[in-house]
Image (cartoon, rainbow, N blue to C red):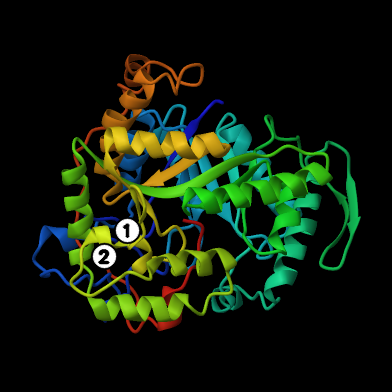
Amino acid sequence: MSLKFHWFLPTSGDGRSIVGRGHSVPLGADGLPAPSAAETSAATAIRPPDIDYLAQVAQAAERNGFTGVLTPTGTHCEDAWLVTAALIRETQRLNFLVAFRPGVTSPTLSAQMAATYQRVSRGRLMLNVVTGGQADEQRRFGDHLPHDERYARTGEFLSIVRGAWSGTPYDFSGDYYKVQGATVMAPPEPRPDVYFGGSSPAAGPIAARYADVYLTWGEPPAQVADKIAWIRDLAADQGRILRFGIRLHVISRDTAREAWAEADKLLSYLDPNEVARAQRVLGRSESVGQQRMQALHQNYRENGYASDLEIYPNLWAGVGLVRGGAGTALVGSHAEVADRIEEYASLGISEFIFSGYPHLEEAYWFGEGVRPELRRRGVLAGSDRSEASERSETSGASGTSKTSGASKTSGAPGTSEEELALSSSG
């Protein structure tokens, strides 16, 4: 099986603690993430998501052999389409997995945007369709449909997008859309792959019919295996075969002790009151996947250790204490992280979307630690170029570990609890 590895663009901000907006730590009165470490600590310095810093992260991902970068969608991050379009000329071969919500734009317009993007980028677009699992976030964009109907609408949306790309004017009349002659100037070449996630009964059939890659958050292997079997069966009923991907954070170090020490530091920066507030808000999510993530945090205790939340060997649920969406991380030595990657791959996972705090430095830890280990094992054979080739191809890009300004950014004061909830793919 050919494996692909993707990284993540932190378009809501970055730092050495679990930071972000909306799907991460609670915001303080100044609109900034508010971990419990001293304000003067470098651990709490927020790197604003300006284009220069995001370019460094993208270049680091490219330099370290990642195929693409996932870019989230939601109120509390920069727009994924615009940010990634700006980064096309900052990179050479990196693909952009652009998260977007069906239902807030016309499907024909979305088809046109994707087709144009594919030509401008010379084929570097991938699409992450985020149906949305948080009612208040959906209402913010004018979407008042209930959960299951949002998935039904997504199916119609993707049908129109595919029809508009067909090269022949496409008519469609459904419960949520009616279009006549939907088309684009020229079909995208290649057609962007559609990445889709969803754990609810309403999500499965839509994924089976329209997705190219089904995504799951990082649950223990047994749960992931069950989900893969479920989607495979649904796809078989449609006469289709899907690929499977998993979304995880990662903390990989030369030794397991160093990796878990880093996880302990991340945990120590969190105020227990922030954890309680985040869990209260995330507990109101309509997302079945979010509910499954939240169930993994049962062993959390104030002043505890990161290892308290090791729910499976090297699988840590600590990130999800204050962050919606992907809430688990692979933690361990490079060899141990490689072991878990191989285990998930044995279940049928062929694409891995990783991230880590801070995203610039962690891209190098993975690229310089885990990838060589996988290469030594032959796991990347046939799907990976040599490290020397990767490095030489991107030597002209400024993909160094030097960071841009890490000053705190301003944000909207008085952020409500609801704005903590999962609002993006991430």
Upstream in sequence: badge 1 or badge 2: 1
Mark 1 touching mark 2, by CB under 8 A?
yes
| Other-residue count near label 1 (Cα within 10 Å), few / some / many at <14 / 14–19 / ≥20 | many
| Other-residue count near label 2 (Cα within 10 Å), few / some / many at <14 / 14–19 / ≥20 | some
At horizontal 23% and vertical 55% (from top left) the residue drawn is 263
At horizontal 32% and vertical 25% (from top left) the residue drawn is 373
**Residue 71 image point, x, y percent:** 47, 50
Amino acid on which disc 1 is placed:
Gly
Instruction: Tell me the element at label 1.
Output: loop
| Label number found at residue 409 | 2
At horizontal 76% and vertical 55% (from top left) the residue drawn is 205
Say whether residue 68 is left or right of residue 366.
Answer: right
Most foreground residue, 174 or 91? 174
Amino acid on which disc 2 is placed:
Thr
| Label number found at residue 33 | none
At horizontal 16% and vertical 52% (from top left) the residue drawn is 261
Q: Answer whether residue 364 is visible to the viewer in this image.
A: no
Most foreground residue, 67 or 240? 240
**Residue 181 image point, x, y percent:** 89, 49
* Pointer 1 residue: 13
Image-quadrant location for residue 376? top left
